[in-house]
Amino acid sequence: MFTTLYIRELQNYLYSLRFQVSFVIVVLVFALGSISFVSSFKDLHKNYAQYSKAQQETIGKLAENVSKVATVPNYFVTSPRENSIVADCKENYLPNRIRYSAYNVFNYSVRHDSNNPLLSRGDSLSWSFIVSMFLSFITLLFAFDAISGEKEERTLALVFSNAVPRRTFLCSKLLSIVTVVGLMELIGIMISLLILAVSGQVQLNGSFMIETGGFILISLLFITTFAVFGLLSSVVTRYSNISLLISLCFWLFAAVIIPNTSVFWAKKLFSIPTSEEVAQKRHEASYDINRNAPAGSWSSNSRDPFYPRHELRANIQTNLMNNDKKYNDAYYLQQFRQFEQTRNFTLLSPIAQFDYMNEAFLGGGYLRFQKNWNDLHIFQERFLQWFKDIDAKDADSPHWYNPYEDYSTSKKPVAIDQIPQYQEQIASFGQRIEFISGYLIAMIVTIAVLFIACFYFFTRYDVR
């Protein structure tokens, strides 16, 4: 019975005009998005290579003085992700540059890849964007009149004139919609992979194909969410035009209202101090440090490393750095907490759930930033210890560690290949699965609640 109903529904959808039009649109968007990605990724990779070369040249100059290697701030900039064709993970809006030295991890910022910041890119036509914006809408177009439409055409009463269980009929509708939309997505991804293979910009290795397979499974779960809601909107009313209105309201809520009001809710529900307030407190504390410092703390003599007041200068600079670090790190933790709480609030939107799941599975976005932020703090401690070990061997150094200047530590040259350099460690699949679990549970619960509500209303639906 189920197979017969499923094949019948599948044929109806495949031969319909809405499928033909939707299929053409989806294929064109996937192809256009892939062509756009190939072009932009090539430019991003070129810009990153130039930046890396400039960084190495800077390190080469600093290597003439090991203290400058330790004190002059360096920058870690995230490299372009090859799997960003799958999902860009909103990395255009997240910090992608972290400033650090051997003494401290100072801050993070957003580095624009465009030569003209006025032309900074918005959401790219990644697979994730196409699924979340286009296929979610198309899914609702297939599902909104699945029940109410058949009632208006009088075919629903004809079907239930036979001994057809309502559960079986509803499940056949759901599976056929997911199959049809999933088929469009699969063909679009295959075309995209073909374009990527021809371009040679992305290595289609085993890891990339695993990520592609994982994305397809996640997107099918996402499509199921919208298919279930479309069916729900179709069983709560007898008229398909009202079902369409309900479906459109849901899509606007999930795709437009929740994402675009997240900053508003963050400020209202999870407020944190402003950067100006934190800066004021930090400056007041710095002023107290300067006021209470011993006389001559800012004295220096560049020709004599053992000048006694260099120790005082190193102490006050260290105290000022620690003061800045105390306030900045506390403020960053507040920012992280606010960001995470806001994300949990936006889980009301299935599109937000889908985006966070992709981000977690691909190891991009906030997961990537957090991992680099934490890993850099570990690296910074090793970097400082490396410098202290070299300084300890220099008899011409008084070993008074100044985090910003080279007055009282070794000025010996060092080989470039001996200088520790931070290398990004991609999150393992185990870490990604752990990060994705909460979002996965949220989506499964959403589907279950919607389906239970859909089945409840359908059992009481007048099919006549």
Image (cartoon, helix red, strand yellow):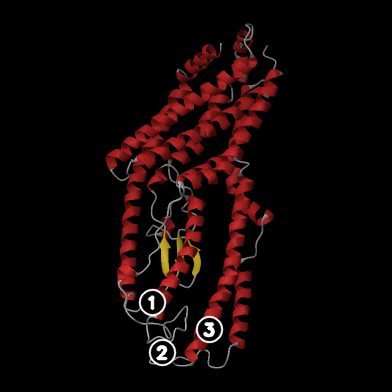
Q: Secondary structure at mark 1?
A: helix
Q: Nearer the viewer, residue 214 or 21?
A: 214
Could you tell me how far apart the alpha carbons at marks 2 and 1 are, in whole angstroms?
16 Å
According to the image, label 1 marks what residue? Answer: 390
Give the mark toward the camera: 1 or 3: 1
Residue 336 pos. (x, y %)? 58, 58
Task: Characterize the local packing of mark 2: few (<14), some (14-19) or many (20 or more) Cα atoms within 10 angstroms.
Answer: many
Side of 170 where 112 appears, left or right: left
**Does residue 255 appear anywhere in the picture?**
no
N-terminal label among 2 and 1:
2
Q: Amino acid at mark 1?
A: Ile
Residue 348 pos. (x, y %)? 63, 41
Residue 57 pos. (x, y %)? 30, 69
Task: Characterize the local packing of mark 1: few (<14), some (14-19) or many (20 or more) Cα atoms within 10 angstroms.
Answer: some
Q: Nearer the viewer, residue 83 or 119?
A: 83
The correct choice, above or below, for 235 with respect to 58 in the image is above
Which quadrant of the rendered structure holds the C terminus? top right
Q: Amino acid at mark 2?
A: Pro
Q: Nearer the viewer, residue 99 or 129?
A: 99
Which residue, as the protein is rendered here, is positioned at the far right? 460
Which residue, as the protein is rendered here, is positioned at the far top? 162
According to the image, label 2 marks what residue? Answer: 305
Q: Secondary structure at mark 2?
A: loop
The correct choice, above or below, for 339 with respect to 85 in the image is below
According to the image, label 3 marks what residue? Answer: 315
Q: Are marks 1 and 3 in contact (CB under 8 Å)?
A: no
Circle number at residue 10: none
Q: Nearer the viewer, residue 445 or 413?
A: 413
